[in-house]
Amino acid sequence: MTIIPAIDIIDGHCVRLSQGDYDKAKTYYRDPLDAAKQFEDWGLRRIHIVDLDGAKASQPKNLAVLERIASQTSLEPQFGGGIKSTDSLRSVFSAGASRAIGGSVAALQPEMFEEWLRLFGDERIILGADIKEGQIAVKGWLEKSAATLDDLLQRFMRLGLSQAIVTDIAVDGMLCGPDVKFYAELQKKYPSVDITVSGGISSQADLDALASAGLRSVIIGKAIYEGRITFHF
């Protein structure tokens, strides 16, 4: 299983939210590069960077943080938050992202997301599907769309989509454990898509359960920052 540590950014700082609530942000590192270097020291290879300021502003706001992490570590950054245009997407790749995540665009402007898959390929474009009360949340988790997760997966698989991050907002940052059954059934239903689990990871036992259920990658945030999970490869 691929372990991907998460860095969420507000005002240039590394924070974590609880259930997607911006008013419940807790700062863990004033400089996200310090967190990234710790992950690099542990032997992790990828890093998940979410520009929360960018998600609100509908354009990336923390590309300087991405650029520093990409240039000063060996980590492979995947970046999301505020990527609403092809120009913004290109700026994210220029700043050093190996992969980019399209969430709101995929739900609200699917034709643009399809064009991204054509232009950049499925190795670099990831579907970000954030689930809130059974619906896809968009615009920094502040609104809901009419599209369902099945709608998005089935539409974009036709163009070769191979990576999707599925975040359960209800448990994100709550350290209460993921819905293993939900993710297992989703991965079984869409075997050609690498379903990345995001939200609620609290312990090594959670990782073991997901791996046993056939999941191949997982994003971990607060459980690392709170010392519940450590890695020494």
Image: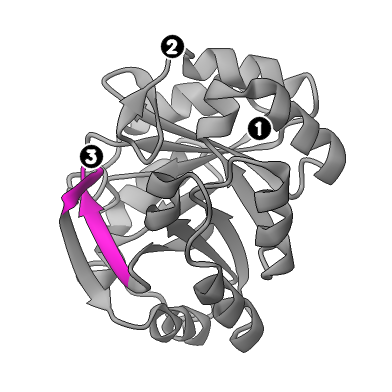
Q: Quadrant of residue 134?
A: top left
Residue identified by numbered label 1 = 193
Find residue 231 and report its horizontal and vertical position in percent.
40, 75
How far apart marks 2 and 3 lie (CA) works out to 21 Å
| Residue 189 placement, left or right of 222 | right
Q: Is residue 17 magenta?
A: yes
Res. 1 visible in picture:
no
Please provide percent x and percent y for residue 62. 48, 66
Q: Is residue 53 magenta?
A: no
The crowd level at tag 1 (other Cα within 10 Å; few <14, some 14-19, many 20+) is some
- The colour scheme of the drawn protein is one colour
Residue type, numbered disc 2: Ala
Q: Are marks 3 and 1 in contact (CB under 8 Å)?
A: no
- Residue at x 23%, y 54% (from the top left corner): 17
Give the residue number, with chain letter if any, for mark 3: 171
Q: Is residue 157 above or below residue 201?
A: above
Please tell me which residue lies in front, 112 or 75: 112
Q: Quadrant of residue 152?
A: top right
Q: Earlier in the sequence, mark 3 or mark 1?
A: 3
Mark 3 → mark 1, Cα distance in angstroms: 23 Å
Q: Which residues are magenta?
A: 14-23
Q: Callout 3: helix, strand or loop?
A: loop
Mark linked to residue 146: 2
Above or below: residue 196 compared with residue 37: above
Question: For residue 6, which quarter of the picture?
Answer: bottom left
Pick whichever, 220 or 15, lies toward us: 15
Three-letter code, disc 3: Val
Mark 1 → mark 2, Cα distance in angstroms? 22 Å
Give the camera-side residue of 191 and 154: 154
Q: Which secondary structure, mark 1?
A: loop
